[in-house]
Image (tube, grey):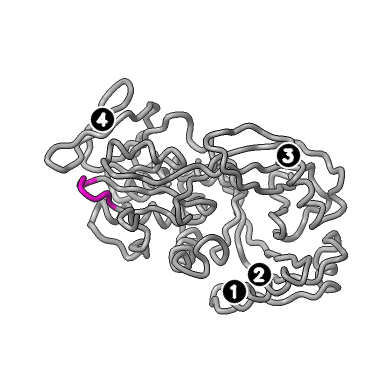
Amino acid sequence: MGCATAYYLSREGVDVTLIEGRRVGCGASGYAVGLLNPLTGSGIPGPMESLSARSFEIHRQLWPLLVSQTDVDIEVEMIGHLELCHTVDDLVAGKEKMAFWQKSTSFTAEWIEPDEIHKLEPRVNREILGAVLLENVALLDSYKFTLALLKASESHGAMVVNGQVIGIMSSGGQVTGVKLNDREIGCDAVIVAMGPWSNSASNWLEVDVPVKPLKGQIIHLEKLDPPLGYHLAGPGQVVSKRDGFVWVGATEEEKEFDLELTTGARNELMDRSVKMVPSLDGHPIVRQTACLRPISPDRLPIIGPVPGLDGTYLATAAEKKGILIGPAIGNAISDLVITGETDIPIASFQITRF
């Protein structure tokens, strides 16, 4: 969110300073699987539909720009998504999803019978009852995408400062700067894009920012030869990525700021993978990761101005959709800073709803 906002602001000639307490992409922005599917997730169908669809369009416009402005390969690929149905309940839910997906003019969705599934991907569980195939979702490397946004921002003049923010300065209801642990930086606008740590800005802004962390663990397995040709979902997700590994994700754990890698999560994820692809039983695990995603009480993002303090904005609580909706939110916040308005559909996500 921070790098996307910095990109769109700096591209318009605004002087931008990005303050980072650790290193860019060392949390969920770097560890996420990187699947871009605007037709699933919290608030879909519902309030997130328009924002997710718009952000997918923005992504597709953005990729060639980032390639031309940086030397970072963000490893984008268009891929099919198979929603696997193991039970009758899964089958009912899958066909409900298909009916919704078929309303989209940008994607195609169809029901696939078991024998057809195994022609597409013979390693899928033979006991499957069927699947929904959704074509043309996208997959990228989330860390490299975040890095590309950062490098493109710097190419437009943005500066990165390492430091710990400890407060916000203001005068007469207008923000005037940011306090760091070792200095102060004057400014006309502040964007709080602090992910799961956003609640710590509540005292500075004099408004409760109801964001907490949602822990997610992922395992990477040794590569399959040939790689899986589809993103498989149900339960969880299994996908072969361009780094050569099979990614299996992800847990959802309310564990505050705990980042411990656990055996329980590893076993749960392996069980999920084997349920989808039985041949993964005993497949070597090469890496396990944990990160924290920011969630709000209604699991929808918090985007827009902070009431009572002009020049302050929130860009947080994207839950598990940060990589997908980050560019749209960055674009929208840039619009608000520069012109005071945006045509990106964020009106439903302001902090005032709480």
Whichever of callouts 1 and 4 sits on the residue coming sooner in the sequence is: 1
Magenta stretch containing residue 216, yes or no? no
Please give left or right for residue 245 compared with residue 211 in the image: right
Whichever of callouts 2 and 4 sits on the residue coming sooner in the sequence is: 2
Whichever of callouts 3 and 1 sits on the residue coming sooner in the sequence is: 1
CA neighbours of label 1 inside 10 A, class few (<14), some (14 to 19), many (20+)? many
Whichever of callouts 2 and 1 sits on the residue coming sooner in the sequence is: 1
> Residue 293 placed where, x, y %?
52, 45
Please give left or right for residue 124 compared with residue 299 in the image: right
CA neighbours of label 3 inside 10 A, class few (<14), some (14 to 19), many (20+)? few
Note whether 50 is above or below 194 in the view shown: below
Q: Residue furthest toward the left?
A: 172
Question: How far apart are the alpha carbons under marks 2 and 3?
Answer: 31 Å
Please give left or right for residue 205 compared with residue 26 in the image: left
Which-is-in-front pick, marks 2 and 3?
3
Image quadrant in which the C terminus is located: bottom left
Kindly identify the amino acid type of the residue bearing the numbered disc 1: Trp
Question: How far apart are the alpha carbons under marks 4 and 3?
Answer: 45 Å
**Would you name the residue on which mark 3 appears?**
264
Question: How far apart are the alpha carbons under marks 1 and 4?
Answer: 47 Å
**Would you name the residue on which mark 1 appears?**
101
Please give left or right for residue 350 compared with residue 47 in the image: left
Which-is-in-front pick, marks 4 and 3?
3
> Which of the 4 quarters of the picture holds residue 120?
bottom right
**Would you name the residue on which mark 4 appears?**
185
Whichever of callouts 2 and 3 sits on the residue coming sooner in the sequence is: 2
Secondary structure character of the magenta stretch overall:
loop
Extent of the magenta region: 305-311
Tell which of 205 and 151 is nearer to you.
205
